Image (tube, rainbow, N blue to C red):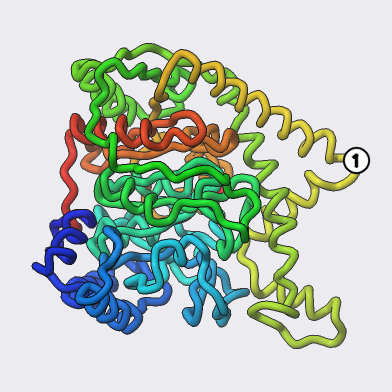
Amino acid sequence: MLELTASALAQKIRDREISAREAAETANHRVEEVEYRVNAFLTPTPYVALERAGRIDERLQNEGIQPWEGVPIAIKDVLSTRGVRTTCGSKILEDFTPIYDASALVNFGEDLVMVGKANMDEFAMGSSTENSAYGPTRNPWDPDRVPGGSSGGSAAAVAAGEGWWALGTDTGGSVRQPAALCGIVGLKPTYGRVSRYGLIAFGSSLDCIGPMTRDVRDAALLLQAIAGHDPLDSTTANAEVPDYLADLEGGVSGLRVGVVKELMDERIDAGVREVVERVVGELEAAGAEVGEASLPHAYYALEAYYIIAPAEISSNLARFDGVRYGLREPADGVHEMYRETREKGFGDEAKRRIMLGTYALSSGYYDAYYAQAQKVRTRMIGDFREALSSYDVLISPTSPSVAFEIGAKTDDPLAMYLQDICAVPASLAGIPAISVPGGLSEGLPVGVQLMSDHFTEPLLLRAARAAEEVADFEFSPRP
Ligand code: GLN
């Protein structure tokens, strides 16, 4: 059972070859077996999984279930789950239990077989999951290495077979980069395709919830389950949700594929570039029309992102004041209470970004930093518009390197931020992007990133499916 994809398992559940309860038991057992060396979960929820799986089996006898239901899933701990602790990887929310479910989870169905709440960088800020207040997650490929971040717990859970798939969130790469580093598929949908209601906010103009899965078909199925308009999130698109599985096997014959030259330069490790080049070559052999694409402002995307994202988080984190949610440190007077609570509750990266963001937004500096970054963002959108008028899909690496060692970048925030150079352009533009395992370098997985125009996920998934097919990679749970 552990070797099946989520789609295959879902089919077997519907065919009653495997019960949802057996699947949940298998996932729970796997968590017990490998968690001591992976640390993918902040809150395992074995009883939630079993109870809901039982209800799925009951419904299967009666009214039936949706094609994605019954398959155990890991949920990043930034998504609100009714009655289940939701910490965002932060001390400030250590004892916070939401009273409602995030809309994406509601869309999935009421009997979501949740294996646990997955570890993450505090408030999703980071690229290694080392910013979690509850200890790092370890990469199932090598326990001395990071799983990437910020959805590192979700990625590691899938790679280790602790559940068949997961939900992560991606503000500037946090679904795609950990997927790449753990050898799984990670899809950031178009901004506004999936409701952010109940997702604890990081960068509200950037945040996207996305599937993290064993293969591209699973990603399409999971997106199908969570996508759609939501009156509770005014930034969701009021547009029909297409059938994401319909075109999946359409292949790449005649598809125009552009390799982004600015994301294939010497900042990217040679071994990573080689894997991407090999996949591109195979796509060409499969009938794609391959050329070189240019995103000139990609060189400035990281700088713009690291103004805009901190600006937004400095505002969003203001709500954690010891009054309404989570931690409250006793003190004399309200200002002291705020200070003590935020001093004890937030980790270093959260504090760093609150300071950077507040600075960038302050009068006198607003024009020089925040407004300037927004102009770069507009340029980035223009670059994509231009490139996507000649190409259907753009390709680059997902991450400049394979998984690095735990501790290697913790003393150097800039080195950590540089992990995101390939991921942030698509985030700034709000377009969909997916990471697919392309092969190995230094014995570790390399992700190939594909990007396409707003709301063209069916096309993106079709291209990704073709890339997955030509890639030199086979999923199997580790260790
Ligand atoms: N690594 C990036 C950051 O630290 C992206 C995080 C994310 O997408 N949530 O901001």
Q: Is residue 444 above or below residue 28?
A: above
Q: Which residue is mark 1?
A: 364
Quadrant placement of the C terminus: bottom left
Q: Is residue 89 visible?
A: no
Which of 194/271 is in front? 194
Q: Percent position (x, y) of residue 147?
A: 36, 54
Locate residue 431 relative to residue 38 in the image: left or right.
right
Q: Secondary structure at mark 1?
A: loop
Q: Percent position (x, y) of residue 160?
A: 24, 60
Residue reaching furthest to the front: 63
Which of 132/287 is in front? 287
Residue reaching furthest to the right: 364
Locate residue 181 relative to residue 228 in the image: left or right.
left
Which of 198/415 is in front? 198
Q: Is residue 22 above or below residue 68?
A: below
Quadrant placement of the N terminus: bottom left
Q: Percent position (x, y) of residue 105?
A: 45, 65
Residue reaching furthest to the left: 17
Q: Residue at x 46, y 66 (%)?
A: 106
Q: Is residue 95 above or below residue 204?
A: below
Quarter location, residue 434: top left
Total marks in image:
1
Q: Residue at x 54, y 55 (%)?
A: 195
